[in-house]
Amino acid sequence: MSIRAAVEQTLLSTALALPERVQRVLAGAPIVLDGQTLATETQLALRLQRVARQPGAETLPLAEGRAAIRHQSALTGGDLPIGEVRSLQVAGLPARLYVPRSAAPTTGLLVFLHGGGFLYGDLDSHDGPCRLLAEEAGVRVLAVDYRLGPEHRFPAAYDDAVAAFGWAVEHAAEIGADPARIGVGGDSAGGNLAAGVALAAAADGLPCAFQLLVYPATDATRDTESYRLFGEGFFLTHRFMELANESYFAEGQDVEDPRLSPAFAAIPAGLAPAYVATAGFDPLRDEGEAYARRLADAGVRVELRRFPDQIHGFFNIVGVGRTSRAAVVEIAAALRAGLA
């Protein structure tokens, strides 16, 4: 880490460790929208970002935007303890296997697919939450670096995700995974892919024990109230989502293709139980919750948990602050139960 990055991380971690009453003074008056109050430390972090004039990734050239995402994730993800991190090739894709310190020779396994709008994100950007999930849930986490747009457009990421899950099922013994306790998960775009993998696994008769969907993108039409309410000022912007669509969709793409929008998929018999986490101040909130209700209406066992004071991206904030990390610890507890 550079000296500048170390200073930035120290300042951020110090600010987010202050007592809430001090944070409130620094953050300003509470932000209340749609009956929800934004977490004080999150409001402060957003204010610090504006004061520092940190540009959004979507405003930068692609390579710089990807570097900015990695930088932001390093600042907020910390360097969390883990038993072992092993580099692998999974279905021809770079991957990392996270093994918790308390791991038995065989544990449950989560195949994890990172977020980033199908054009940002990689193994480094989600290192922090993968470590926390593995340690707190007591399961192995296999993070997969799928192909991104605009270099590789739809359905490249979907195809990679399905292939990676199939590889994990086939090679379970090699990586210490119990074949009866393999699940799939992801955040945002990764949640979209995880939902698609779970649907494909059920349709194809592959064992999938659990799906962990963190503020998943499920409906590319984006015709929701949360999209209108929270698309500016809360990290994930309309412009980011527009750029993601432009970069990943092929020309003339049918946005209701179920591989792209799981909201339009037929729900197959035997679909894995799901835990769906959403954030109150997230443009993707309503589509994630609508998908959870659709699964429940189809008879799938679903737990839906909204974290009303959080924003899109809280899943990566596990190395600083209190409220976002507490939310991810709760998500990890659901993963532990789901792959028990």
Image: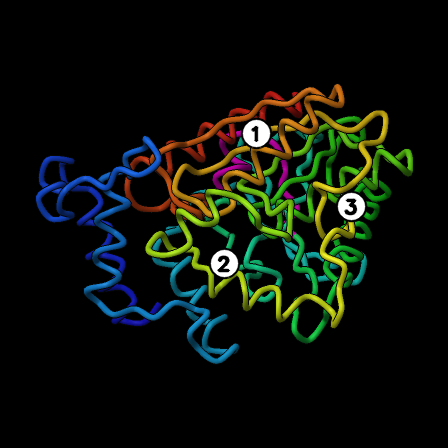
Q: Secondary structure at mark 3?
A: helix
Amino acid on which the number 2 mark rests in the picture: Ser
Q: Residue at x 74, y 51 (%)?
A: 256
Amino acid on which the number 3 mark rests in the picture: Phe
Q: Quadrant of residue 8?
A: bottom left
Q: Who comes first in sequence, dot 3 or dot 1?
A: 1
Q: Secondary structure at mark 1?
A: loop
Q: Who comes first in sequence, dot 3 or dot 2?
A: 2
Q: Which quadrant of the rendered structure holds the C terminus?
A: top right
Q: Residue at x 86, y 26 (%)?
A: 269
Q: Secondary structure at mark 2?
A: loop
Query: Closest to the observer: 289 or 49?
Result: 289
Query: Closest to the observer: 217 or 116?
Result: 217
Say which residue label 1 marks.
138
Amino acid on which the number 1 mark rests in the picture: Gly
Say which residue label 3 marks.
165
Report if residue 325 lies within the magenta region: no
Label 1 or label 2, whichever lies nearer to me, is: 2
Q: Position of residue 110 (x, y in %)?
A: 66, 38
Residue 125: image tag: 2
Query: Closest to the observer: 151 or 18?
Result: 151
- Magenta stretch, residue numbers: 131-143
Q: Residue at x 44, y 38 (%)?
A: 279
Q: Who comes first in sequence, dot 1 or dot 2?
A: 2
Query: Closest to the observer: 104 or 33?
Result: 33
Q: Which quadrant of the rendered structure holds the N terminus?
A: bottom left
The image's colouring method is rainbow
Q: Measured along the vertical axis of the image, is residue 233 above or below residue 290?
A: below
Q: Position of residue 237 (x, y in %)?
A: 43, 59
> How many C-alpha atoms fall within 10 Å of the one at disc 1: few (<14), some, or many (≥20)?
many
Q: Measured along the vertical axis of the image, is residue 132 above or below residue 60?
A: above
Q: Position of residue 40 (x, y in %)?
A: 22, 40
